[in-house]
Amino acid sequence: MDHRFIPNLTDEKIADKQLEGLKWTAAHAYQGSPFYRSSMKEQGMEPGDIKTLDDIRKLPFTTAEDLKDGYPMPLLSVPEADVVRIHGSSGTTGKRKILAYTQNDIDVWKDMFARCYELAGLTVTDRVQICVGYGLWTAGVGFQLGCERFGAMALPVGPGLLEIQLQMLTDLKSTCLCSTASMALLMSEEVQKQGLADKIALKKVIFGAETHTPKMRKQFEEALGLEHSFDILGMTELYGPGTGLECMAHEGMHYWADIFIMEILDPDTLEPVAPGEVGEMVLTSLKKEASPLIRYRTHDLTRFIPGTCSCGLNMPRVDKIMGRSDDMFIFRGVNIYPGQIGSVLEGFGELSAEYQISLTRREGLDHMSVRVERLPGSGDGNDENLAKTVANEIRKHILVRSEVKIVGTGTLPRSFAKAKRVQDDRSEE
C-alpha cells in the first residue's frame, strides 16, 4: 500500500516519539491547567520526573468525573483565545463532558483519520456515506474531516433518514458506509427488504461506537455484499473517532501509537495486565494542546494483540472493545457483561445478532430474561425447545438462570445509534 498518511516507523522510533510527547504533555498540562498541576502535586511529582516511558506510572489518573467536575471547560491547558472548537460526548446522565480543540488539535485529528481511510484501502475515487451524528458529537465531523483530508468524496447524511440513506446508496453509488454496527444492520435489512442489493455499489463499511458480535457483522456484510468491514476506534476525550482501525488482514485494530500512549490495566488494581490479557484501556495524549489527556480511564475493556500483523504495518494492535467495565451488571452475585450473552448466542445459526436483556425484581428475587430474534428465512422450528437450549448454554457459560424468548425478525427496537442491550428495571419493584 502506498502510504501518504501512515508513517513507516520502527519500534524504536515510536518509543522516541512517545517519550518526547509524554515529556511535552506533562510539562504543558502542568503549566497550563490548574487541575493537572494540583493532581500532579498531590501525587508528589512534577514534569521533570518523566525520564523514561516507564515513568508514565508516576503520573496521576484522570477520570470522567474529573471532566464533569471541571465543566464547562475541563482540562483546559491553553488560553481560551486559542480554542477554535468544542465537542461534547453523549453523556447519558448529568452534564456532558466537553472537550476543547486548538487548530493544531483539529489538524492532528484529520491527519490521523485520513490514516484510517488509507488503512481501509480507500482511494480518492471512493464515495463515503457518513451516517453518524453531527453537531456536538465528534463522529460526523470526524468522519467528514478525515474524508476531505484524505481526498475522497464525502456524503454527509447524518444518522436516521432511512429513505435518504437508501437514495444515496442507489443514486450516488456510495462505495463506503460509515455508521454504527446497529445502523449497518438496519440498512442491510432494508436493502434486502426493498430488493436494492443489485442497485448499490457498496464495497466497505467502517463501523464503531458500540460493541458488536461477529454474527452481527457477518449478517450485514453478506446482506450488503461487502468486500470488507472495518471496526474503528475513537472517543470524544481523545479527539474523536479515527484513533485506530482494523486493517484488511482483520487481525485486530492498529492504533496510532505515535499520537497517544495506550496502557491496558487491571480495573481493580490499576496495574498492567499480562500481555494478551483483557483489561481497561487507559489513554495519554502526546500532542493534544487544548485538553490534553493524562492516564484517562476509559472503562473500555480490550487486550493488546502481541506480535506483528501480517499486513506488515508496524503499529501496535488491540482487540475490539469487548464491553465497558462500567457496563457490567451484577445478577444474583455474578458479574456479567452484555457481550458474554452475545457470545453464547453466536453459537446458534438460527438466531440473529439482535438481542435484549431485561432485569426485573419480583418478591425480592432478581430475574433475567433474554429476547433474541430469529434469522430471516430460518423457519419457525420449535422456538420453545430452542429457547430452552439457549438458556442452558447461558447457564453453562455464565452460571446464571435466565428465561429466553425467541421473537420474530424485526421485533426488537432498531437504533440509528448505539444499541441499548440491557434494560434494568430492578429498582422499580
Image (tube, rainbow, N blue to C red):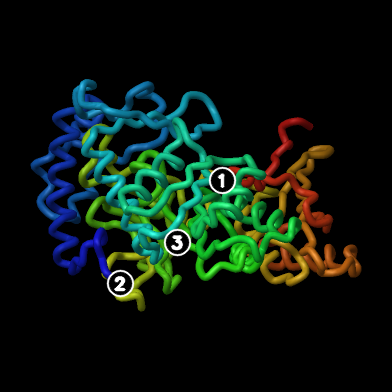
Marks 3 and 2, the one that precedes in the sequence: 2
User: In the image, is 408 to the left or to the right of 420?
Assistant: right
Cα–Cα gap, marks 1 and 2? 38 Å
Can you give x and y, in whole percent of width and height, for residue 422 in the image?
67, 45
Which residue matches tag 2? 1
User: In the image, is 250 to the left or to the right of 384?
Assistant: left
Observer-nearest of 204 and 421 = 204
Observer-nearest of 257 and 169 = 169
Q: Residue at x 30, y 45 (%)?
A: 109
Camera-nearest label, 3 or 2? 2
Which residue matches tag 3? 278
Residue type, numbered disc 3? Val
Camera-nearest label, 1 or 2? 2
The quarter holding residue 348 reads: bottom right
Q: Residue at x 66, y 48 (%)?
A: 421
Q: Which mark is residue 327?
A: 1
Is any part of residue 336 visible from this angle? Answer: no
Q: Quadrant of the N terminus?
A: bottom left
Q: Are marks 1 and 2 in contact (CB under 8 Å)?
A: no
Is any part of residue 296 visible from this angle? Answer: yes
| Secondary structure of residue under mark 1 | loop
Can you give x and y, in whole percent of width and height, for residue 243 in the image?
35, 52
Cα–Cα gap, marks 1 and 3? 15 Å
Cα–Cα gap, marks 3 and 2? 31 Å
Indicate whether 136 appears above or below 163. above
Residue type, numbered disc 1? Asp
The quarter holding residue 80 reads: top left
Marks 1 and 2, the one that precedes in the sequence: 2
